[in-house]
Every structure is written in structure tokens, then in C-alpha cells.
Image (spheres, coloured by chain):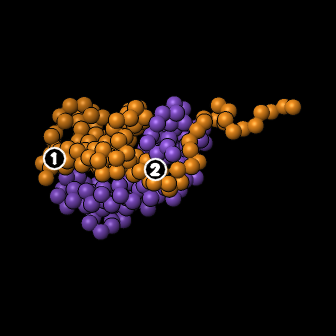
Chain colours: A purple, B orange
Amino acid sequence: MDPGRWSYVAVLGFVLIGCLWLEFALRTRVLVRARRLFASMVVPVLVFYAWDAYAVASGHWTFDPGRILGIRLPGGVPIDEVLFFLVIPLAAILTLEAVRSVRGWMAGDES
Amino acid sequence: MTYTQLGVLAVLLVIAFDLWAVRTRLVTRRLFWVSYAIIVFFQLITNGMFTGFGIVRYSGDAIMGSSSPDAGPPPFVGDGRLAFAPIEDLLFGFALVLLSLSCWIWLGRRGLQRTPISGPPIWRRAPTEPDEGP
């Protein structure tokens, strides 16, 4: 496969490099709470997948076929986008828990 | 609906979800806004890569600015864009981030892996760690 087709996924790799170290350096303990992490992604993935399918069908945005993997899911959503809807919630949750680790501010889930 | 209209609608719906549906009330918390400030900085870099390299292109019919050009990157700032990306992406990103964080806090509050809690950073001693030495 033409390496250019990994462009989209490479940007997601950049995001992961930018945030995964927080799990160890700031002891965010997000990855070890995997069930909570994956359960948290269910609603965002469903909602934003539907939005993406609508946007693709309406022509709001298009993807350069030479820069995505080329696997399309129902509704014309590239598989790269589904990875985006998993990586961004992970990055957001890691960031929130990193700030909480350092500052100790309340989040609303304390017992 | 245009991307602009959908973005505004999504932000309002997710704020309503946070405040009244699951009552996580993250938009009232300093923790959320400091985290969001960090996230949006990196969103501008990441989105700038998606749009500046032409991985994703936008239709001028759906956004406030013009369509992404066929050749070369769109404006870095101006014509409804910030860091190459349509400013509507800020609404999309805010909705995705707030919805994800609200679900995370909601599930924790309901008792799904509330623990182990985060922290402390590795440069601070954990409070449960026994003292060294005799």
C-alpha cells in the first residue's frame, strides 16, 4: 500500500504519542480502568459516527482517497474516522485525569 | 443542515446532557475548563494537520468560510478558518470532548471502576507508600 494512505492514521499516532505518557508520568490510571474507558466511548462513537455519515452523505466534508486507508464502513464513514472517535475521547480523558492528578480538583465522581 | 448549524446544535445538546441528563455538571467545574484549554491547544495542531495537508476537505456550502482549495492549503487564519481548519471544528471538538468526559465521570459516579483514582504524579510520593528506612 502507498505509505501516503497512512497519513490520517499517522496524525492519530501523533495524538497518542502526545497523551499516552500521562498514564505513566501522572499515574492517570485510565488504561487500567479499561471497562470504564470503553464504556465511556460507546455514546460518543455512536453519536459522532451518525454525524459523520450525515456529513459525508451531505457533502459537508470529503477525504483524500490517497491519504486514508480506504476501508469504508456503512454510511461511507472511513475506518480512519472511527479510530478518531476512539482516540480523541481517550486523549480527553487522559488529559482530565492528568489535571486532576496534579491539582486534585473535584470532578463529580468522588464517593 | 449546514455544518455550522449542526455544530451549534451539538454544543447545546451536549451541554444539556452534561447539566441535566446525567448531571455531571462538568461545565461548572474548573477541572473541565483547564483540561479543555489544554485539549483545544492540541486540537488546533491536530486539525491543522488534517486540513493543512488536505487529508480532509470542507465544502463552502456547509461552513461559514469557502471550500478547501483543490491545490494547496486553505488560509491559516481568516475566511472562517483557524489553523487551516473551519472554526466549526471547534464546536465539533467541544461537543466530542465534553460528551466523552461527561460519560466518563457519569460511569465513575455510578460505580464503574471509580477506583483506582488518578495521581499522584511520579515526582510526588504516593500517600499510601510506606516510609523508607528504619
Under mark 1, the amino acid is: Gln
Q: Secondary structure at mark 2?
A: helix
Q: Is residue B64 visible?
A: yes
Residue B17 tag number: none
Q: Nearer the viewer, residue A14 or A34?
A: A34
Q: Nearer the viewer, residue B98 or B37?
A: B98
Q: Secondary structure at mark 1?
A: helix
> In percent of the image, x 37 and y 61: which residue is there?
A79
In primary-sequence order, the first of circles 2 and 1 is: 1
- The quadrant of the picture occupied by the N terminus of chain A is bottom left
Residue B116 screen position, x and y as percent: 59, 48
Say which residue label 2 marks: B109
Select label 2 or label 1 by which is in front.
2
Residue B33 screen position, x and y as percent: 37, 33
> In percent of the image, x 50 and y 54: which residue is there?
B111
- The quadrant in which residue B37 appears is top left
The answer to whether A82 is drawn above or below residue B3 in the figure is: below
Image mark 2: chain: B
> In percent of the image, x 15 and y 40: which residue is there?
B64
Q: Is residue A3 visible?
A: no
Under mark 2, the amino acid is: Arg
Residue A17 screen position, x and y as percent: 51, 43
The answer to whether A64 is drawn above or below residue B65 in the figure is: below
Q: Nearer the viewer, residue B46 or B130?
A: B130
* Cα–Cα span, label 2 and label 1: 33 Å
The answer to whether B62 is drawn above or below residue A70 in the figure is: above
Label 1 environment density (alpha carbons within 10 Å; few <14, some 14–19, many ≥20): few
Say which residue label 1 marks: B5
Residue A9 screen position, x and y as percent: 42, 53
The answer to whether A3 is drawn above or below residue A72 in the figure is: above
Direction right: furthest residue: B134
> In percent of the image, x 52 and y 33: which residue is there?
A104
